[in-house]
Amino acid sequence: MQKITRRAPAPAVAKSAKIPASSVAAKPRQQRQKSGKAANRPKRLRRWSADEVREAFTRFAKANPEPKGELEHLNPFTLLVAVVLSAQATDAGVNKATRPLFAVADTPQKMLALGEERVRDYIKTIGLFRTKAKNVIALSQKLITDFGGEVPSTRAELETLPGAGRKTANVVLNMAFGQPTMAVDTHVFRVGNRTGLAPGDTPLAVELALERMIPPEFMQHAHHWLILHGRYTCLARKPRCEVCPINDLCRWSEKTVA
Ligand code: SF4
């Protein structure tokens, strides 16, 4: 097996750092005009070897054996609602709104009884709250009508719910049903491209590349490891390369370690 030498000690994933406001990397002004996708692409596209991929995820697993998502929820239904509300919003902002909402409505029936106007009041601090309130009511209705009030456990069924796309389906399948899916959000998209682990122009391309690259035994938690890595270490504007546990493996030509 290939010998891999680390350049810095691997810290535990820091949970106290701030969530970045943007996924655009820190760059000179003229370079920033390039798309975020292109700006985050490694210039040298030497592929990761299977041993390097295994090594990276072994380190993530050692630092954080049971990574958890940060969206608060009580059951599959509240998880689904929280993920729908989290589009273009921070998990912290969503949690602040959903704590009181889920205290009164933790089932599709209760959400429907609450009604769109009151749901809107609970979530008015979240971006796009009007559309999201409509979707929460509509998906609650559809769950009752089409799925016996239960959250379905297939991607195809989940994607029929108002406000739920592929990423939402993948999060629910992973967290509620223990399926080894890869939900690609802004953090996973950036990390996949920037490190060279799974370059792709679209979230779907990155998702499929990650599924190809990551050994099956790491897939269950890989989504959370990559989100936490992007959120707290590989920050969009100022990546913390000096404390990054995979800095020797990363292919990004602008990383701040040798
Ligand atoms: S070295 Fe680590 S923190 Fe820096 S760009 Fe690469 S993955 Fe991100």
Image (tube, grey):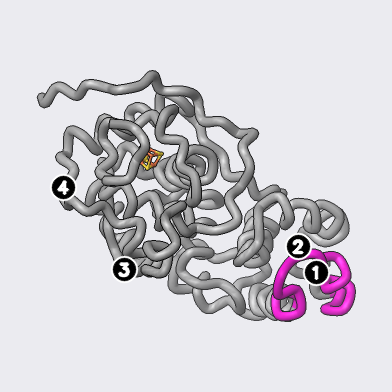
Give the CA distance from mark 1 to mark 3: 37 Å
In contact (CB < 8 Å): disc 2 and disc 1: yes
Under tag 4, what secondary structure?
loop
Nearer to me, 62 or 125: 125
Amino acid type at circle 3 is Asp
Query: Can you say which quadrant of the picture contains the N terminus?
Result: top left
Image: 118 above or below 43: below
Q: Is residue 254 magenta?
A: no
Under tag 1, what secondary structure?
helix
Give the residue number, with chain letter if any, for mark 3: 201
Name the N-terminal-most of marks 3 and 2. Answer: 2
For label 3, count other residues whose C-alpha is less than 10 Å away and answer few (under 14), some (14-19) or many (20+). few
Give the residue number, with chain letter if any, for mark 4: 47
In the rendered structure, which segment of residues is drawn in magenta? Answer: 113-133
Give the residue number, with chain letter if any, for mark 1: 111
Closer to the observer: label 3 or label 2?
3
Give the residue number, with chain letter if any, for mark 2: 107
Position of 114 with respect to 245 (left or right) is: right
